[in-house]
Amino acid sequence: MAGLGDNRLSTTRRNFVGATALAMLAPGAVKAEAPTQNHVPGFAPPEGVALLSRNENPYGPSDKAVAAGCAATRDGAYYADTSLLYLVDMIAEKNRIPRDFISVSAGSGEGLCAAAQSWTRDGGKIAAPALFWDTTVRYAERQGAEVVTAPMSGDLGVDLKALEAVIDDDVSLVHITNPNNPTGMLLDPDALRSFIRRVEGRATVLIDEAYNELTDHPDSASMVDLVREEKNVIVSRTFSKIYGMAGLRVGYLMARADLTARIRSNIMSWISGPGLAAAIASYDDNAFLKESKSKIIEAREMVMSAARDNGLDALPSQTNFVFVNVKGDANLFRDKMQAKSIYIRGAYQGLPSWSRVSMGRIDDVARYISTLPEALNG
């Protein structure tokens, strides 16, 4: 396929991954864990704290990512430019798109905000569901943009008909998170594709797929096929979730070349070298991804079962979190959990009884479950 690159770059990329692994075996190589006297605290929750509020994957980064990232710190004096091409090459190959369809950013958040800035700079509005991960639109609002929202469906799903109804001539960008955050629910892929085809002549559709790899059928759930068709759509992905690299800040957006150029114009010049190295090493680490997904699903099923046992409603999730109706004050529920060193999310605007809990380590999720009766009734 044109634009995917030649064998020379692919071979060089494979050599890069192999070299970082070999470097870790050499005498004097940087160890994955620094000596205690050099440890800087504050990057992970303290011992005894169950951090279930930020949708992180506590099983990451993978061993390969840690090895590559640590090795890359030895070249931290230099900006990471060539390594960025390695990652772009991998993303292009896997998704069967040209390189100039890809923009890499410091976490998907930077790319999402870059898109919001670019599409609203000349007065365009953003249309979005009333309930979703709204960092992008909040950023745009702080820059003076106007955001219009559509009501959710009765089951708290994204109502595509309602969203289409708010798209007027001033709307330049439609933002959807799929699966949605905080609900965890996945839109019907065919319905979403039909929606994009209907509205793409009026506005660009931005699909945040941060949790795509956690869905039952990631390939069919993704809208990247419409990127290949060069539709007016942007698909966002991140290494923060299934890859367990939230603190390393690497994400990417995929869109046809003219849209990607607009996004790139608002992205900072450099990405962290260790982050890029970790992303390259873990992108195709299928064993790690499979193990992480299995543990996350196990924890999710534990929470869903506990919710039923306690007479609570929980939305069907295809992510690493569950949205639970605690049938009371969700903020009070959160505070009671926090008193036990269990950190979760409290109420969302307009939904005072709904609380989101992330799928952390199995032991931490078990603590949440064992504390449920007391937090609900105490």
Image (cartoon, rainbow, N blue to C red):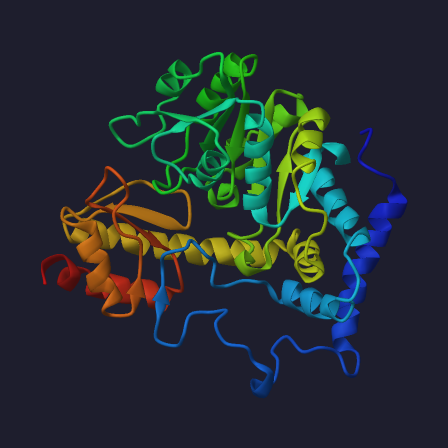
Q: Is residue 88 left or right of residue 65?
A: right
Residue situated furthest right in the rendering: 8
Comparing 44 with 366, the one in front is 44
* Image location of residue 111, percent across then percent down: 60, 41
Residue 234, quarter of picture: top right
* Image location of residue 263, percent across then percent down: 65, 34
Residue situated furthest front in the rendering: 144
> Which part of the image, by quadrant, shows the C terminus?
bottom left
Residue 224, quarter of picture: top right
Comparing 322 with 300, the one in front is 322
Residue at figure coordinates x 48%, y 53% from the top left: 293
Residue situated furthest left in the rendering: 377
Residue at figure coordinates x 65%, y 56% from the top left: 282
Residue 28 appears in view: yes
Q: Is residue 348 left or right of residue 276?
A: left
Q: Is residue 366 left or right of residue 230?
A: left
Answer above or below: position of 42 versus 272. below
> Which part of the image, by quadrant, shows the N terminus?
top right
* Image location of residue 124, percent across then percent down: 52, 22
Q: How many marks?
A: 0
Q: Is residue 265 left or right of residue 243?
A: right
Comparing 62 with 156, the one in front is 156
Residue at figure coordinates x 67%, y 78% from the top left: 31
Residue at figure coordinates x 53%, y 13% from the top left: 202
Residue 238 appears in view: no
